[in-house]
Image (spheres, rainbow, N blue to C red):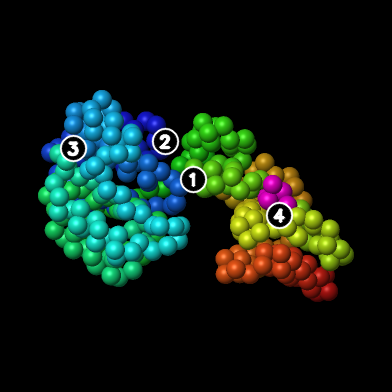
Amino acid sequence: MWDNIKGHQQNKEFLKSLLQGGRSTPSLLFYGPEGVGKRLLAKAFAKSFLCLGNPLEPDNCRSCHAMDAGTHPDLVQVAQLAPGKELLIEQIKDMARQAAYAPTMSTHKVCIIDGADFMKAPAANSLLKLLEEPPEYWLFILIATDINKLLPTILSRVIQRRFTGLEDRDVAAILAEHQVEHPEELARLAAGSPGKALAYQQADALMWRERALNVLENAGNPAIMDFISNLEWLDKVGNQEGLTFLEMFSLLLRDGLFLKDGTKCQFFNIDLEPRLEQCFKLWTTGQIEKTILWTGESYRGIRARCASKSVIEALIVKISLMGKEQDRD
């Protein structure tokens, strides 16, 4: 069931068991990494839950057709107005007003609250009132990435289902279905998240990975300022591109650590292993760890609207100076 959604077999079996009863179920919370399929499975389950025929084999009733068309009157979806924005109390109150009405097509209503971990106290308390006494015929499905941001009182009112990253082969298969080039490489970089892998493809992450590795390979260049001035892409890098560069930079550094301690099973960039072995041959573990910290600081700087060019230049110079200090020692 739900074979078009890869992975998450235990969660699928749990949800399937809920459909075999009287479709009366407590509120649910799907949580886990971004982009691993929480929303897909929530909507697939909602389609089955609202089905007017056999919920274990949905597709042929008018409820299922309405779900496929995105026009189902008994499906209510609440989501952030933009990535990173909080859910507003007005959105929760509007949902509460709709909760006063009985279903019009199916025998139940389903509300999917996406980004539930982006609620501040007023919105969260408004939602809590609904969860404490859920309206008859309503099912609530909360979706969150960081469960620690949810009120303990909300967590006590829901059944929690944890989602984890997919196997690399499953992510690569999804990318191949979308006709994405280099699916295996992107799947490894995305650490089990098809959503992140597709975002990396759109951001041309493999190009930025090559540029990041080029910088690391030249970190010991005695003429580092000349090297920086010859990086033509650096003059044109925008903030989103700068963030992608630093993400790839960080993954390469983490592979450098894996090389030092022999943990190759966790490699992000297995296709670049020979170059990485040569690149980090003279690095110490301490230097790699320090550079990872600097990379994180640089990432936060760009997120805070600092110019990517200046941030990346400063990072390259710091790495170069670190190497020269070691040479003096």
Badge 2 vs badge 3, beta-carbon distance below 8 Å: no
The disc labelled 3 sits on which kind of residue?
Met
Badge number at residue 6: 2
Above or below 114: residue 2: above
Magenta residues (range): 207-211
In this picture, residue 76 sits left or right of residue 245? left
What residue do we see at 42% from left, 36% from top? 6
First in sequence: mark 4 vs mark 3: 3
Vertically, is 92 above or below 188? below
| Residue 194: image location, x then y, percent | 49, 42
- Asked whether, in this view, residue 215 is left or right of residue 292, the answer is right
Q: Which residue is under mark 1? A: 195
Q: Residue at x 33, y 39 (%)?
A: 70
| Residue ID at (30%, 39%) | 71
Question: Alpha-carbon distance for marks 3 and 1?
Answer: 32 Å
Magenta region's main secondary structure?
helix
Q: Where is residue 165 in the image (x, y as percent from the top left)?
A: 45, 46
Q: Are marks 4 and 2 in contact (CB under 8 Å)?
A: no
- 2 or 1: mark nearer the eye: 1
Label 1 is placed on what type of residue? Gly
Labels 2 and 3: the sequence-earlier one: 2
> Is the N terminus in the top left, top right, bottom left or bottom right quadrant?
top left
In three-dimensional space, the C-alpha distance between marks 1 and 4, rounded to whole angstroms, equals 22 Å
